[in-house]
Amino acid sequence: MRAKKLCAVALTLCMLGATGCQGSSKNDTTTSTEATTVAETTEASATDVATTDDATAEIPSLKEIYKDDFLIGTIYAEGSLNEKDVALMDSQFNVITPENIMKPEGMQNVEGTFTYTSADKMIEFANEHNLKVVGHNLAWHQQSPSWMAQDKNDRDKAIEQLKSHITNVAGHYKGKLISWDVVNEAIEDGVSLPADGDWTKCLRKNQWYNAIGPEYLAMAFQFAREADPDCKLYYNDYNLELQQKADVAYAMLKDFLEQGVPIDGIGIQGHMQTGVPAGGLDYALSRFSELDIEISVTELDVTYNGAAGPSLTEEEQVKQAITYAQIFKTLKNHSDKVERVTFWGTVDSQSWRGESFPLLFDSLYQPKEAFYAVADPEGYLEKHAEDLGVMPTVEANATYGTPTVDGEEDEIWKDAEDIKINRQVMAWEGATGTAKALWDENNLYILVHVKDDALDATAENAYEHDSIELFVDEDNGKTASYGADDGQYRIDVNGEITFGTYPGQDGVKGFAVKEDGGYRIEMVIPFTAPVTENTVIGFDAQVNDAKDGARISVAKFCDSTDNSYMTTENFGTLKLVK
Ligand code: XIL
């Protein structure tokens, strides 16, 4: 089934100009008239939006462009919908997903009391605006009331609760939704399918799993099918662009289909990042295409980490847009199997990851470069051929000074700047850190504070401990593989030091100290060649987050890939300043 053809609505958008409007270099597909009139603007904020009678610009309609390919969706963010959001919904989208209100805690926060008012209003709104609606979601480890499956020793009670929740909620919305995300995020992070193919070993130990066991998934789908027989039933998860997780999901879906579990679709959330190639998405789409199910991208957003200012510069926007163009080019190649592509929001300022500007419109409701890239991916990539493959490099400074390396935080660290380690590489959640760097003629010194309230170093593999990894490329050569000047150094929460490839220099030393809400590490790495003021070295830092003996997330300073241990190409830089 494809998107119903809706008439093209020329969108009237005010153009506020100035800050936040860098996305106005349009590509050839746009029918835009130049945004001329409102040149003088002051700093405008998300709430300070212009009225629609300022100046107008027409932009193409994404739902029209993709009408023969897939539905184009956005979220229904209850409570914050203004006139401009509605105008964009009308012109750009044909399907909505409630951002929060249909989650278990929204539907049944108190056992036995169902609260349908907000979601009923959304259905009414959708009908008035010709929008289809996706239900999100019925069983999840988050945003669920604590009474659900509370007693892990009472399996029958948990099954009864799961059944009652799904029967009531899916029953109430019977016939009103095109699909339900029945189970959300059930696969653990950082796992790979075991040799025996048993995907149940890869499940997250959430409340439903702990009380019911792996069978809770099949049960949830069964209850949903009984409650709303014509609704498409989805399994929805993030990081399916990572081959290992896609393989686990594939094994699970295949098993479900063979056993007659009523499942119709796989939702690839698509919480992605600028600079990460679309090859992973292509792999997932190809893999899932082998199965008799539909595929949707359900929560697409592409973060830009490390932006220089309060909004993206044009150059930063282009980098992000290239990633969006690559994603849409890939989606178009699989359009026979892709049913819907939903963005997790429309305007950056309203995004749950707003600090990294992940959406198609800026806070002033102006289309960004990313919008034009989505509107015409091939054209955009051709136009920006020379920018392809450009990864955003994050730069930071190391301050001159020599601390005593003993795990104590000497006064001298106060002078060093904060270096955020918060680019999530594997997951969208997990431990992050803040580093500081000092240098002298002999050594590089690094201090990291990690926010992680559950410490774990029980795994056999050192990289699966709560730990910090430091990557140093002394000549900033950005080479495809490690050279004599490159090193990978790891220290775990207990102060145990391990190495990847490294120059083997004497004097590497480090300490770890547990502190409130996490831990800190202090480490010294001797330079192998002379350095002076203004030397720039390649550098990255990584926070490994572990739980129950497995690595569940990786956050980085710069490198958005998980390949820092093999190549220095994507490292950020540290400038040695005085
Ligand atoms: C997010 C919402 O956008 C936030 O408003 C809320 O605070 C947390 O949840 N995967 C999902 C979505 O399936 O439901 C999540 O939405 C984002 C990750």
Image (cartoon, rainbow, N blue to C red):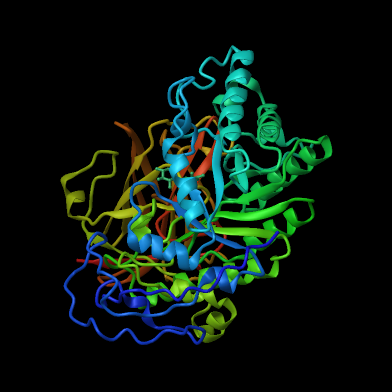
Residue 100 seen by the camera: no
**In-front residue for pair 5/59:** 5
- Spot occupied by residue 25 in the image (x, y as percentages of width and height): 39, 83
Please say if 108 is above or below 473: above
Quadrant containing ligand 1:
top left
**In-front residue for pair 263/5:** 5
Query: Based on the displayed image, in which of its 4 quarters is residue 337 positioned?
Result: bottom right
Residue 238 seen by the camera: yes
Query: Based on the displayed image, in which of its 4 quarters is residue 241 positioned?
Result: bottom right
- Spot occupied by residue 563 in the image (x, y as percentages of width and height): 55, 58
- Spot occupied by residue 338 in the image (x, y as percentages of width and height): 67, 60
* The residue positioned farthest toward the right in the image shown: 258
328 with respect to 359 (left or right): right
Please give the count of numbered marks on the rendered protein: 0
**In-front residue for pair 187/6:** 6
Residue in the image at 23% along x and 81% along y: 38
Residue in the image at 17% along x and 54% along y: 415
Q: Quadrant of the C terminus?
A: bottom left
- Spot occupied by residue 110 in the image (x, y as percentages of width and height): 43, 22
* The residue positioned farthest toward the front in the image shown: 128
Please say if 61 is above or below 343: below
Residue in the image at 35% along x and 63% along y: 84
Q: Quadrant of the N terminus?
A: bottom right
Please say if 143 is above or below 179: above
